[in-house]
Image: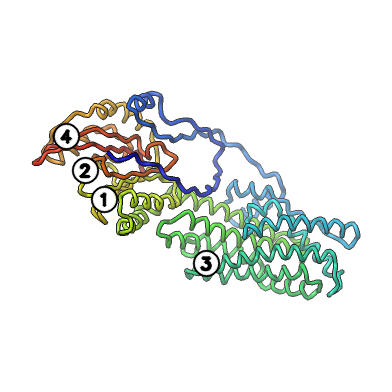
Amino acid sequence: MSKPAEPIEEEESEPIVDDAPEELTEPLEPRRSRELLQEAGLESRNLEVKKTEQKEHWQPTRPLTKTILQIAKEEGDVLSQESLKLIDRSTPTVRNYSSSSEDVAEAMEKIKEWIDITKEFSDAGAVFFEKLADNLEVFGTMGSLVKVFITLTQPHKEDPIMKELGVLKNQLQTLSDSMTHQFSELKGFIVEQQFFSSYAHKATVLFEYMLDTLTTAHPKAKELFETEYNSRLPVTFVTEMLAMLETDATNPLKVNMNGDELMSSATFNKWTDVLNSTLTQFLVLETFAAGFLHPDDKYMEQKIIEKIARFVTLVKNWDNDYRTGSHYWPKCVEQLVYKIQDDSSFRRDEDKIEEIQKGLLKIHTNDLFYVVCFAPNLPWHRVIFRPEQVFCSLKRGGYNVFVYRCTKYAPEDVKRLTDRMHSRMMNFRTRQNYDAWLVEAYLYGWTNNSLGENAFIMVITSGNVATRWPKNVSNGPGVFTYESRLRKTSLFGGTYPVYIFVGAVNVK
């Protein structure tokens, strides 16, 4: 008998919250099914079914959010409730400063607050809209303050305001350097090179001009920033970027997901962050420019916010598409399994299956995986009812590998299956069969008209069989595993332990 397989830790990526209402959960298994499984000494699958409450009616509370909704209507953009809630948190009210002593004193305190806020961004190495939404007024007010004091401060003369702004600049410079380094690492594909030269580089250059205005007490600094700003407005770049993201062929995230052997969560999250950071950097620049150059004109700032809200909506849609779709199947699984099977450094079935499961858990999907690995010389049979849910690689690298994916758990099928098969499986009679196909036919007869959405059964000698499943289910993604003994008499005879796996799948 093989030692019990151990669930391994599943890599988790931060899920993007959708617009569904709050949910209540309750155990899936009906009481009768639980009792049957307990009597059999089997653990039921620890999954939950969701019951939704009536959706709460949400309305925006701030004028900005209502303005963004109007712009979205004009642009033909669909915005998610999540993105609108982010905007509703923001407070882009610009404080216009004068040269009075009261304003100077207040400005000194404000700059110290901004230093703390921007330090969080610089420590993170990027600025994301989700974080900026709560501090959107900072950069507009900063622009207004610099506009006033850049005309009052004499060049080459130390000023307490400019000194504090120098500290602020250092924080923002660290942030800019981190983002530039991040962008420079992403120039592998043609679409990435286009993205870097067209958008990321432009944002970086304009950001540097903005930083110069913080510590260069000379009207020339304002002139250089204004010239660069007007050469191509941030709102133009943001609009172009969103158009690029709406098309798969020019979407860096989708291009890189297609180029990733595993379509991994790491790649998805990496590009989500890069795109978010670049768009938000343009928003920072526009917000600063509004206070610095045109405090009475907020349209371009509002339009950028609307486009970022559209981006948040798109990311949510992409995330759901990858998590619930079949983009990775079976190509990514096939490449992974073949690679591990062909790697001679993994000598044991436990070594191979461990690496396979680690790879599977990196895929950006909600599917659960059950993996079986064993030597091809072991007696085994299989009955597969839904082959589209099972990937098999036989007699490669000295091992057979089965990967089963589970996308749905059907409680009504589980109850019907356990009610019908419980006594048969626990009191499995010895049968004599002279041909292997009779064994499979007998197994099929067990489940005729009762499998429902369940996937397949494997019968195999349980010794030297390695299995893996995710940590958040008690006994694999299927209903249960079971061991008994099956007598199969052939020319040489023999009695073998039976290893059975039944799994529930989604019918698409």
User: Could you tell me the amino acid type at mark 4?
Assistant: Arg
Q: Are marks 1 and 4 in contact (CB under 8 Å)?
A: no
Q: Which quadrant of the view contains residue 274? A: bottom right
- Left or right, residue 353 beside residue 303: left
Which label's residue is closer to the chain start, 3 or 1?
3
Query: Which mark is first along the chain, 3 or 4?
Result: 3
Amino acid type for the residue under numbered disc 3: Leu
- Nearest the eye: 310 or 67: 310
The residue at 69%/73% (across/down) is 228
- Please tell me whether residue 438 is drawn above or below residue 90 in the rendered image: above
The residue under label 1 is 400
Quarter where residue 121 is shown: bottom right
Circles 1 and 2, Cβ within 8 Å, touching? The answer is yes
Mark 4 sits on what residue? Answer: 487
Quadrant containing the N terminus is top left
User: Which residue in the protein does label 2 denote?
Assistant: 380
Please report whichever mark, 1 or 4, sits nearer to the chain's N-terminal start: 1
**Image coordinates for residue 491, horizontal then vertical, percent:** 8, 41
Q: Pointer 3 and pointer 2: residues touching (CB < 8 Å)?
A: no
First-in-chain label (2 vs 4)? 2
Q: Are marks 3 and 1 in contact (CB under 8 Å)?
A: no
Q: Position of residue 218 (x, y in %)?
A: 81, 74
